[in-house]
Image (cartoon, helix red, strand yellow):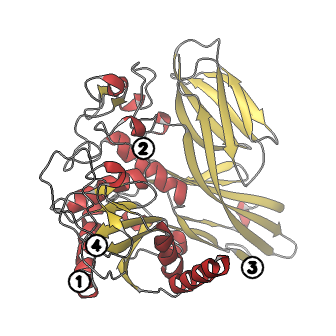
Amino acid sequence: MEKITILLALILTNVLASQTFDVETIYNSGDDEKRINLVILSDGYQESELAQFIVDATSFSDELFSQRPFLEYKNYFNVYAIKVPSNESGADHPGTATDVNEPVHPVIDVDNYFGSTFDYANIHRLLVPVKTGVLNAVLANNFPLYDQVIILVNTPYYGGSGGQYATASLESSANEIAIHELGHSFSNLRDEYWAGNQYAAEAINMTQETDPSLVRWINWMGDGGIGIFQHCCGGNSALWYRPHQNCKMRVLGPPLCSVCVEGTIEKIHSLITPIDAFTPITTSIIVGPGTDIDFTLDLNEPVPVNTLSTNWLLNGALIDSDVSSITLTESDLEVGNNDLVVFVEDVTDLLRVDNHSSVHIYTVTWNIEFDPLLGIVQAEGTRADITITAYPNPVSNMLNVSFDNPMGGAFSVSIYSIDGKLIRNATTESQDMLQVDMAELEAGVYIVKYYLGNAYVSSQKIIKN
């Protein structure tokens, strides 16, 4: 019996491994290795309905990129659709849900590819693809470079789910359902309606904190309808709060609130660098009086307004800002080793950097050797992403600052009062974390500035309780 079981498992594995399907490009903005790849899968579409699946996938993509912040960061994404045919149309509906408070659609057993079913966990609207092994095999065999998956299920009844894979039905508000579920799966957002005790947790847009000076979305308070709103009317729900009364994570139709927009941008920043390429990677040139040496970034700029800030430093001194290329000459260089560094940061007003703990900085460093006797310049460029995390914010006693810095080198922190007075400094030579004692400082807002060596990197506000 054991041998038969193993044989069946091997047969199933081979069958799954052989399943390759047509992959259609819905939107392409660049190299898959340098983009967030959103992959849309079909379930409950028969072979004859796959053309409609592409229409549905395109409609979702168009709607997604018409809404903030996907509108501004559209060029950070590629979108692909994998046309997976099912034997039958639709989704299972076993009729086992205990929370039905809407017209009941027929109980049905559908032979679809990923096993998408309503009534998952006895929740009527919870539409989930249960054949995760099959789903993973399709992704592995057809588009292993995926970053986020959404499954469109060919059923006209309201349903969807978040989790590892976002899922949405084709009910009349299908695109809104899909974007809401993507908020869960991609951005780690919580429902802003009360979904049940099992879904309650501290998150970007959910908290039990009611003190306006401590709440995680403190810097948005009072702006664009942001406040501290109780989830519901009794029991455990009364202990939890959301930032907005009319966010897409609560009701379909409105936009994401500014707190959820910020959380989505944070996710984008954690997955992708805005530096597509840089030149030179390596170069060796003969120089002479007036010889130009060009250094250039190929930046993936947000739209319609470029919110990327650049600071160029040569040997620790700022030489230019907010440009994507600079030109050096022989007279700019010191004899021997020179370091040219460019720091790139997204300074969009959709992201209030002092409202969360992490700052994302993207860098390119060129090590430049200049030999005036030979008249030769050799330059080699390397790229690195720096993440600086300061917590807690607000802080009462000790501020912890960690540096994820592949470049290495000494990092330092300077604390300034809001009127620009230097309060204190802290430096780390080799460790990736330092602590700043703020216990004796007066309550208020302080500016924390970060330096790599002598080079200014970034800053953020810290609130002292």
In this rendering, the answer to whether 67 lies above or below 235 is below
* Residue visible at 88% across and 72% down in the picture: 373
In this rendering, the answer to whether 19 lies above or below 336 is below
Q: Residue furthest right?
A: 373
Whole-angstrom CA distance, mark 3 to mark 4, is 67 Å
Q: Which mark is residue 120?
A: none
> Residue 420's x, y, as percent?
55, 25
* Residue visible at 45% across and 35% down in the picture: 201
Whole-angstrom CA distance, mark 1 to mark 4, is 15 Å
* Residue visible at 40% across and 60% down in the picture: 302
Please state which of residues 314 and 245 is positioned toward the viewer in this rendering. 245
Q: Quick one: SS at disc 1?
A: helix
Q: Quick one: SS at disc 2?
A: loop
Q: Earlier in the sequence, mark 1 or mark 4?
A: 1
Q: Is residue 405 left or right of residue 184?
A: right
Dot 1, how many residues are within 10 Å of its Cα: few (below 14), some (14-19), or many (20+)? Answer: some
Dot 2, how many residues are within 10 Å of its Cα: few (below 14), some (14-19), or many (20+)? Answer: some
Whole-angstrom CA distance, mark 4 to mark 2, is 44 Å
Amino acid type at circle 3 is: Ile
Q: Residue furthest front?
A: 1
Q: Earlier in the sequence, mark 3 or mark 2?
A: 3
Q: Earlier in the sequence, mark 4 or mark 2?
A: 4
Question: Residue at label 1?
Answer: 49
Amino acid type at circle 4 is: Val
Question: Residue at label 2?
Answer: 351
